[in-house]
Image (cartoon, rainbow, N blue to C red):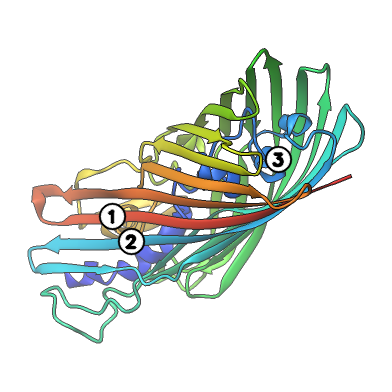
Amino acid sequence: MKQHMQNWKLAAAILALAGAAWATNGDNLIGVGAVSRSMGGTGVAAPQDAVGGMVNNPATMGFLPSGTKSEATFGGTLFIPTVRAKITTPGGVLEGRSQQQPFVIPAVGIAAPINDRIGFGFAAYGISGMGVDYRNMHWDLDGNPKNGYEGDMFTKFEVMKFSPVLSYKLTDDLAIGLALQGNYNNLDLGAGSSHDYSYGAQVGLTYKVGIAQLGASYTTPQKCRFQRVFNFDAFMGDNNLDTLELEAPATYAAGIALIPNQTFMFEADVKYLAWSQAAGYSDFDWQDQIVAALGAQVKPTDKLALRAGVNFGKNPVKEHEGWNPQGVTTVQGKQLPTFGYEMMRNIGFPAVVQTHVTVGLGYQVNKSVSVNLEYMHAFKQTISSTSMGNAITLESSLEEDSLGMSLNWQFE
């Protein structure tokens, strides 16, 4: 058993294949920018700022509240996950809390209408990543302090997206849009950072009818490769660093917003994330995920906007029961101990939260400048699995909080 426990360090590296994240909807943030996040991550049909439009649906740039004015949004989110791990074995219990520091996630967007039909914009924002740090978790299997490494674990995975966007209004009520997406991906598993670039696109459609605004978008899969990032076959005597593949899944989204007047709006979005078809995620048995989001905005005065929302997406990480702790599992052509594989999925994988609640507000400082604030809480969610004969139980939990702010500037 002690030999299997020493595979903990190997499991820490394996988890990068599945991209555990600033985990919210799988490894994607529920939304980008203070306005979208304060409204449950909505924005497919009727985003309220430039960043929300370019992230959720490029076609909506033609229908932003700023109208034909140019608009710039600058913001950031302080993301604070609370991750805990627990392993129960015949020899005792090993448990602790990840010491990873909070993440700061930037978001910048600039929308510049060329004329009343064509809109152009550019966005740069953090969208997914990972961070788990159990390096201070030094216990033996009886729970006693120990200067060993059985509990050591550190990983850091980051994705930054850069996206030029173009929209075109076919009529006064119908628009289409295209966003080209380039991603910088960085991974550090203790053997040094490895980075790669991935590319893709997003297409969108928006249609206004009466007090309703409809939107839909599709984002292509986007694959990256991390070369010479870690030696996964070390337990078999191999001395070479391996290459890992990780693919952001294809994403389908649709939404409807009701805007009866300038005081109130309500939006409902649904997204489908094809995790089971994406490299890395499929290897670690993720299931496809449907995400539902609701958001509302009320303006009690011309200067003040109050916002709230909820976001729910079932944890995509399947729970496994009856696995063999002495076995071997093949992932992307590599032979991995099944114990390490299962520990990665459960202990080293914080992508399990499901229900998020959000609140926020916006204040119009003057005719051109507004400030937006948001707070999100993701309720604690636990995942566990048990080996054959109930010999080993692996359990992890995740709870999240975030605080965000953005500055929005409209200009001619």
Q: Secondary structure at mark 3?
A: helix
Q: Residue at x 25, y 69 (%)?
A: 96
Query: How far from the left and from the top, in percent, is residue 38?
Result: 52, 44
- Quarter occupied by the N terminus: bottom left
Query: How far from the left and from the top, in percent, is residue 317?
Result: 35, 43
Residue at image mark 1: 397
Residue at image mark 2: 83
Q: Residue furthest bottom?
A: 147
First in sequence, mark 2 or 1: give its number: 2
Residue at image mark 3: 54
Residue flagged by tag 2: what amino acid is it? Val
- Quarter occupied by the C terminus: top right
Q: Is residue 113 visible?
A: yes
Pick the front one: 355 or 203: 355
Q: Secondary structure at mark 1?
A: strand
Residue flagged by tag 3: what amino acid is it? Met
The image quadrant that residue 255 belongs to is top right
Residue flagged by tag 1: what amino acid is it? Ser
First in sequence, mark 3 or 2: give its number: 3
Query: How far from the left and from the top, in percent, is residue 229?
Result: 54, 67
Pick the front one: 125 or 304: 304
